[in-house]
Amino acid sequence: MKFSVFFLIFFSFFIVFAQTSLSDADRESLDQLIMDLTNASKGEKKLNDIKVWPGNSSIRVAVYPSEKVSYKYNLLKDGDTNRIYIDLIGVDASGFRLPDVKYDSFLKKIRLGKRENGIRIVIETGKVESYNVVEMEEPWRIVIDYYGEKIPEKVAEKAPEQIPEKSAVKAGPKEKQEIKKSETQTKKTEKTAAKTEIKAKKKKIIVIDPGHGGKDPGAISGKLYEKDVVFKLARKIEKLSKNYEGIEVKLTRNKDIFLPLEERAAIANAMNGDLFISLHANSFKDRNVGGMEIYHLDNTRDEYADKLARVENKISENVTLLDTILVDMTMSYYVGDSLKYSSEIGQGLKKNLQKYGVKIRGYNKGALFYVLVGARMPSLLFEVGYITNKTEKDLLQKDEYLESIAKSLLDSIAASKVK
Ligand SMILES: [Zn+2]
């Protein structure tokens, strides 16, 4: 506050002296600056940032006000153009510039308008099938996902019998329609067999997400941080992947930086990944508890998994918001393939890590991990062990052990039945 008042006085003097030599444009931007500072000194809530990640007929938008605010949102459907608006109550956005966004047939336009009691963000899109809204902490923000009706190309190319039974059973009317569509599209792709063959030989892109990073250390055990353990493992996977012809590994972060949760799946989407794996390490007060776990995104309400998800999610305690995630049809598309990968990787680890005496506590486990929400590909959260467990803490600091995990993981992906 003091700082802005000081600048206000400083610039007022500056203007008195400089006004005669200023061009109109300069004068305007100075006036704007003074207006911004005046508003800031009134203690109004400001709009700090809007981040937009366009995906394959999906959009993720994160809105960052300067503090927690009340908000309203709605979806207005009007033919081929849908309008989503978010009203932030009591927020001032004067001087705020919208980010440069590449518009396409799905993300058509973003506008920012003043309202009597705040501001309105309007996003014009193609047909929206579903959306979900989540409040996140540190800093407080709203993250909204919109999913269009176009199904991703990769799913469309699959033969109908390859669509896992489980997801077909779970599919609601919308999903069933999409599966039907994918059947027709498959017939189309058969005609262009040559083209498909070239695509089939394409490398599988595996996006590895080392959890946490930067200011967020994750779990801590003495001097050992979760963020460092998983980063070291991610590097090993990346390095070792050069030995696998059909696999290309990309990392969501390649240094010790902080990445908000919602950015991670968005990065994987931008990388056009075929599989997304977020790496984590667990902790518990009882040092005897240990073992590995592999999770996929699901609405299973298991008490243990719920607790773990809460630790990793950093989402405002609001069950109704978590429930809205279930609307995300992307989840049911990929749950079948995620399960297949989970079994294959889990069984591989069981066999290959036997000599270390590490327990594989479970795979094929579902939980609501926000980091996996919105990934347009099969996705897993891999808890590589307990850094609080005496044996595992030692092992997780050994190159040889991390390399064994990396190799087992890559072997399973290379041999996977998921195409
Ligand atoms: Zn974690």
Image (spheres, rainbow, N blue to C red):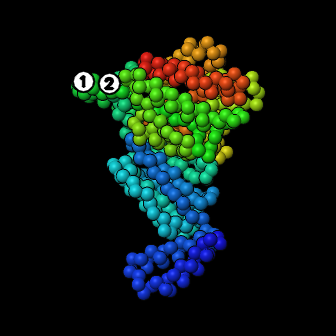
The answer to which image quadrant residue 219 occupies is top right
Q: Is residue 398 above or below residue 148?
A: above
Decide if residue 80 is in sight here: no
Q: Is residue 119 above or below residue 225?
A: below
- Say which label, 1 or 2, has the lower sequence index: 1
Q: Is residue 211 above or below residue 11?
A: above
Residue that label 1 marks: 193
Front-most of residues 220 and 293: 220
Residue that label 2 marks: 200
Residue 32 pos. (x, y %): 48, 74
Point out the image quarter for the C terminus: top left
Residue 16 pos. (x, y %): 50, 86
Front-most of residues 187 and 211: 211
* Residue appearing at x 61%, y 24% in the figure: 398
Q: Is residue 260 left or right of residue 82?
A: right
Residue 67 pos. (x, y %): 62, 59
**Label disc, if present, on residue 19 of the rendered structure:** none
The answer to which image quadrant residue 233 occupies is top right
* Residue appearing at x 54%, y 60% in the figure: 48
Decide if residue 95 is in sight here: yes
Amino acid type at circle 2 is Ala
Q: How busy is the neighbourhood of tag 2: few (under 14 within 10 Å), some, or many (20 plus)?
A: few
* Residue appearing at x 40%, y 56% in the figure: 100
Amino acid type at circle 1 is Ala
